[in-house]
Image: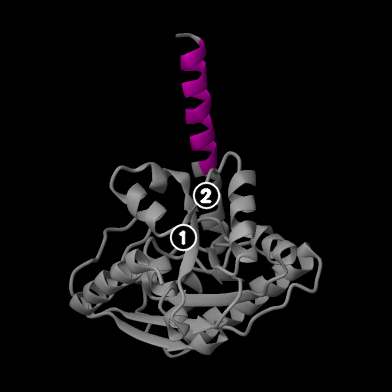
Amino acid sequence: MDPVYRTVIGIARTVFAAQGLKFDVTGADNIPARGGAVIAINHTGYLDFTYAGLPARRHKRYIRFMAKKEVFDNSKSGPIMRALKHIPVDRADGAESYRAAVDALSRGELVGVYPEATISRSFEIKQFKSGAARMAIEAGVPLVPIAIWGAQRVWTKGHPKRLGRTKTPITIRVGEPIQPDLPAAELTERLRSTMQALLLDAQKNYEHPAGAYWVPARLGGSAPTLEEADALDAADVEARNAAREARGQGLDGA
């Protein structure tokens, strides 16, 4: 029983209905009915975690998502994130969040993770960090891959929000659980290839207008290629590091 989470989900469903979102979900039974599991999700938009929680409701379960610490520090979103027992991630030092996630998994929780670590501006599957695999191995729980397609049309990096009644179709594909019976590097690659296959399946019957910003270059859209998007991400990281260094120097000189 989790009354706060249940209430938030009820509100979210009302919002989804008002927006006219059309969900196509397959594989929800692959979410374990009990026990811990790492729920690995591709990352194309700011709201795809809200959609990823829907398949878990097949067994009346909740996902504790790992999210950047800044969301918890916000005066509006922070209290909600803590009430829902999500897990804050400090990108400068992730050891504490990693341990909190393993502890939650060991208690039988579902923990939601973005193995790509950041939104894919190409809307393709980026390279994965190994954290999801390492958590699954340490906690002795399966990885459950989820691919979501269409979330980037609602709200994604570098483009305006479309939160009105857009009637956007959202496709969700849940893969079979992957047992943590490989070394972390190999398990990470297996997870990535599985999620790539799920994404291709989600895209198969989806209409992709030529030139649309939310459509990958591979499918005739105007999104950057994976290589171009990686270069943009690298530039962002460099800018953040420079800003952090500048702040540090400012404090030293104060």
Mark 1–mark 2 CB contact (< 8 Å): yes
Percent position (x, y) of residue 160?
A: 27, 58
Please state the horizontal and vertical placement of residue 61, each as a whole percent of the image: 46, 76
* Residue 213 in sight in this render: no
Q: Quadrant of the N terminus?
A: bottom left
Pinpoint residue 131: horizontal percent, then vertical percent. 66, 57
Q: Amino acid at mark 2?
A: Asp
Q: Amino acid at mark 1?
A: Arg
Q: Which residue in the structure is indicated by mark 1?
A: 121
Mark 1 residue crowding within 10 angstroms, few (<14) / some (14–19) / many (20+): many
Q: Which quadrant would residue 44 be assigned to in this image?
A: bottom left
Q: Quadrant of residue 145?
A: bottom right
Q: Examine the rendered structure and indicate whether residue 90 appears above or below residue 177.
A: above
SS class, disc 2: helix
Q: Is residue 51 above or below residue 28?
A: above
Image position of 27 (left or right of 150) = right
Toward the top, the furthest residue is 254
Instruction: Give the magenta part as a residue range.
Output: 237-252
Question: What's the distance in space between the residues labelled 1 and 2, CA to CA?
Answer: 9 Å
The earlier-in-sequence mark between 1 and 2 is 1
Q: Residue at x 56, y 82 (%)?
A: 198
Residue 233's disc number: 2
Along the line of sight, which residue is nearer the eye, 157 or 108? 108
Query: Secondary structure under badge 1?
Result: loop
